[in-house]
């Protein structure tokens, strides 16, 4: 079946075949990134605007590099010096960017649903780079891509997501991707941050770190999202760390071959100790690197490309 989507708004709306198409296309682009000439002409003549209205290091730079590797022209929107500071609305900002000739907008915004809103306003592809606590689809796609590189098929694999699930768009996108790929997902953390109603998404919920980590093949840490929490969900960071922080002793409960993941940014010494974040089981920087190939795949497919037309390196 050909790729038909123009926008990437959520993983929830993707089916298994579409997730696999993105992964297959990313695999081909990753081979191209390993060549001495890392660039292909797939999006030559197209202009992509990175409309980031929330801070970002990894996602913004990976989208920027992905677009450049595809030979697109890239414009980084500078929120701090833009007319949004004078009260210009998201709608007016986006319509002006379109009037200036953008062929695609990659948006990060604190408001859940803002990528969907733009997709209904504009006649160009809209890519969600994180909308509030809703979804971060390219993060979920690069995380599952990285897991598959290490484990092969995720069907039946025990994956633990540990931390602030309630406010995490990364958790939601990973839950949708992992359950579609057949993984056995357990969410762990304090009950205030990991409420029981998440089980409606086809995952287990646990507040017992030891039993949740037992034999897990992947543990993904999430940081505490202070910027989205309006009231205290635990007494103090120190108490959170003492109960749920991943340290060497607790990592010993995992499957001996388990990998340790984190979407970043890391709060060292809070959700994860440095010796684990920098240790041999950590694939945190591989996640970042894979973000380029996965985002190349998303930009390419949503611009009308087809997976089978990507030519891998000789
Ligand atoms: N993982 C992630 O979204 O990181 P940034 O906020 O730095 O983009």
Image (cartoon, rainbow, N blue to C red):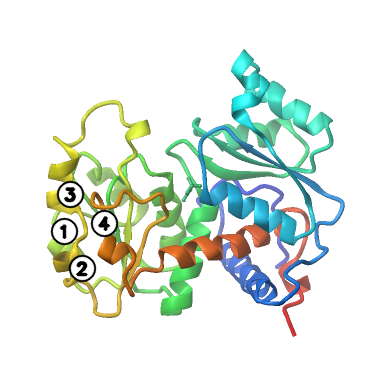
Helix, strand or loop at label 1? It is helix
Residues tagged 4 and 3 counted as in contact (Cβ below 8 A): no
Instruction: Looking at the picture, tell me which residue is in the foreground, 311 or 125.
Output: 311
**Distance from Cα at disc 3 to Cα at disc 2:** 14 Å
**Residue ID for mark 1:** 209
**Residue ID for mark 4:** 272
Mark closer to the chain start, 2 or 4 = 2
Name the mark on residue 241. Answer: 3
**Distance from Cα at disc 1 to Cα at disc 4:** 14 Å
Residue 222, given in percent of the width and then of the height, sits at: 33, 51
Using the rendered view, name the quadrant where residue 281 is placed: bottom left
The answer to whether any part of residue 87 appears in the image is: no
What residue is at 43 percent from the left and 44 percent from the top?
Answer: 169
Label 3 beta carbon less than 8 Å to ligand 1: no
Helix, strand or loop at label 2? It is helix
Label 2 beta carbon less than 8 Å to ligand 1: no
Crowd class of label 1 (few under 14; some 14 to 19; many from 20; radius 10 Å): many
**Residue ID for mark 2:** 251
What residue is at 78 percent from the left and 37 percent from the top?
Answer: 123
Residue 27, given in percent of the width and then of the height, sits at: 62, 73
Residue 228, given in percent of the width and then of the height, sits at: 36, 32
Mark closer to the chain start, 1 or 4 = 1
């Amino acid at each position: 079946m050909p790729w038909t989507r123009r926008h990437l708004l959520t993983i929830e709306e993707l089916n298994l075949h579409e997730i696999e198409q993105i992964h297959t296309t990313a695999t081909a682009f990753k081979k191209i990134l390993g060549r001495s000439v890392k660039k292909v002409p797939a999006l030559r003549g197209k202009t992509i605007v990175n409309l980031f209205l929330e801070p970002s290091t990894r996602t913004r730079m990976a989208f920027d590099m992905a677009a450049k590797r595809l030979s697109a022209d890239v414009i980084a929107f500078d929120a701090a010096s833009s007319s949004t500071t004078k009260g210009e609305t998201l709608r007016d900002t986006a319509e002006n960017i379109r009037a200036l000739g953008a062929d695609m907008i990659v948006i990060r915004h604190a408001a859940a649903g803002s990528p969907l809103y733009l997709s209904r306003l504009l006649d160009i592809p809209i890519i969600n780079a994180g909308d509030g606590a809703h979804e971060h689809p390219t993060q979920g796609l690069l995380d599952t891509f990285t897991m598959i590189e290490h484990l092969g098929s995720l069907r039946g694999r025990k994956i633990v997501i540990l931390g602030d699930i309630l406010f995490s768009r990364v958790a939601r996108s990973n839950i949708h991707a992992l359950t579609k790929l057949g993984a056995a997902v357990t969410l762990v953390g304090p009950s205030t941050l990991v409420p029981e109603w998440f089980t409606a998404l086809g995952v287990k919920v646990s507040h017992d770190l030891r039993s949740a980590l037992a034999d897990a093949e992947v543990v993904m840490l999430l940081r505490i999202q202070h910027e989205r929490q309006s009231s205290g969900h635990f007494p103090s960071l120190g108490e959170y760390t003492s109960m749920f922080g991943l340290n060497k002793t607790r990592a010993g409960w995992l499957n001996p071959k388990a990998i340790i993941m984190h979407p970043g940014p890391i709060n060292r010494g809070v959700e994860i100790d440095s010796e684990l974040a920098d240790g041999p089981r950590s694939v945190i920087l591989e996640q970042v690197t894979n973000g380029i190939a996965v985002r190349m795949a998303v930009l390419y497919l949503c611009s009308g490309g087809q997976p089978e037309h990507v030519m891998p390196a000789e």
